[in-house]
Amino acid sequence: GISRVGLNFSGPGLPDGARHPNDGVTSLDVKHKYATMLNGRQFVANVKISADGETEEYPNFVMYSNPNSPDIIPVGNFIQLQDLQGGEIVGIETLMSDLVVFMTNGIFRISVPNSDPSSWSLVEAHPNIGCLHDKAIAKAPNGIFFLSKSDIIFLDSGFNATPISYPIRDTYQSYTYVAPSLMRIHFDVKENRLYILYDNTTNTSMFMYNLHNNNWSTELHGGVVYDEFTLDDTNETLLIVSDTSSTIRKAVDTAEYRDAGATAITFTILTGKENLSSFDKNSYIRRVNIDSYSASGGDDIDLTLLADGVSVFTLSQGVTGLQSLRTSGRGKYVSLLITHDSNNDKKKLIRHVDIEYE
């Protein structure tokens, strides 16, 4: 005969378990060019997504990981940037609790809530200012500096974009329009200054911007070609030589200021213009008074007085104390050019320069 068995089922009354956080996600294979961390998530930009044997590139996408899992970036976690002027993302950084996305033709601001990144808000903060490339961005404690086509821009915590490159603008623009891919910017943590590399064809020329007093200067590293910056474990800025030797050198060496053997670094400072008279009238420069200090020994620095950009006199400065020098020259404005091309590390100081004119 046939026997039958009856089964009784009873549920314990427990609720269904939570779904896996990646349930329904079609792909986790997300590659990217740029990345930064914010609120326990990794945000990536300019991405490439692979699924079902196919790969698609999204140069205008920002994507984000699951919380506290920076290596897991579901394909559905994306923010699309629509730049009407075209271009692609060339860098991403954090500023306060927001993201800054740098594109070739615009700067975007993304506000991301801690609890739910999907409720982000996006605004094109500066639609007419673009960034050259990813190595043209330097984060500092008080904001972000970056290189645009026309200026070096400081982006503060309020997302205000302020050009800082007016004193060097002509030279700077001549290089951004010719060889922008070679230009670099680096923030020196120890010295609180910026390096802007703008020419490394046969020598290496760099602008230096001192954040203490907002002054510009330049350095020429003769006979050596650098193309990268980095920091060591003591926050010393290092310069990397772009040849087969892959030589790494300190940017600041208090024992010997030299590159490429016996070639010294040439250091120059050009001050801003001090107006002496109106545009339709020249002034006569009668005397220059200088208060300076020079440690014993070592090479002098050269101090050149320019009137309307033309040299009035050059003084090799190696004196301690006051000097008063008669001179002649005429112009509507004056500026000072200070140069030094020695490897000597003896201290030189120009405390004050006073110009008498009528």
Image: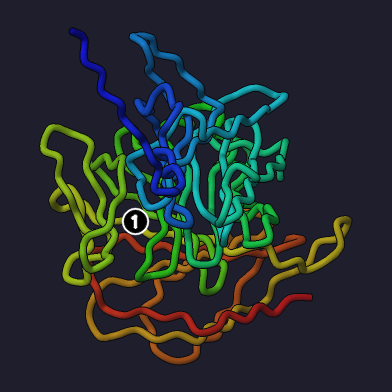
Q: What residue is shown at x 17% (from left), y 49% (from top)?
A: 248
Q: Which residue lies most toward the bottom here?
A: 321
Is 68 displayed left or right of 59 in the figure? left
Q: Which residue is at the front of the view, 337 or 246?
A: 246
Q: Could you tell me residue 277's position as x and y percent? A: 82, 66
Q: Could you tell me residue 27's position as x and y percent? A: 39, 23
Q: What residue is shown at x 21% (from left), y 9% (from top)?
A: 2
Residue that badge 1 annotates: 266
Q: Amino acid at mark 1?
A: Thr
Say whether residue 168 is visible.
Answer: no
Q: Is residue 344 above or below residue 23?
A: below
Q: Could you tell me residue 329's position as x and y percent? A: 67, 64
Q: Which residue is at the front of the view, 67 or 4?
A: 4
Is 259 displayed left or right of 207 in the figure? left
Q: Which residue is at the front of the view, 91 or 47?
A: 47
- Residue 72 falls in which quadrant of the image? top left
Q: Could you tell me residue 62's position as x and y percent? A: 52, 35
Q: Which quarter of the rendering shows the N terminus?
A: top left
- Residue 293 falls in which quadrant of the image? bottom left
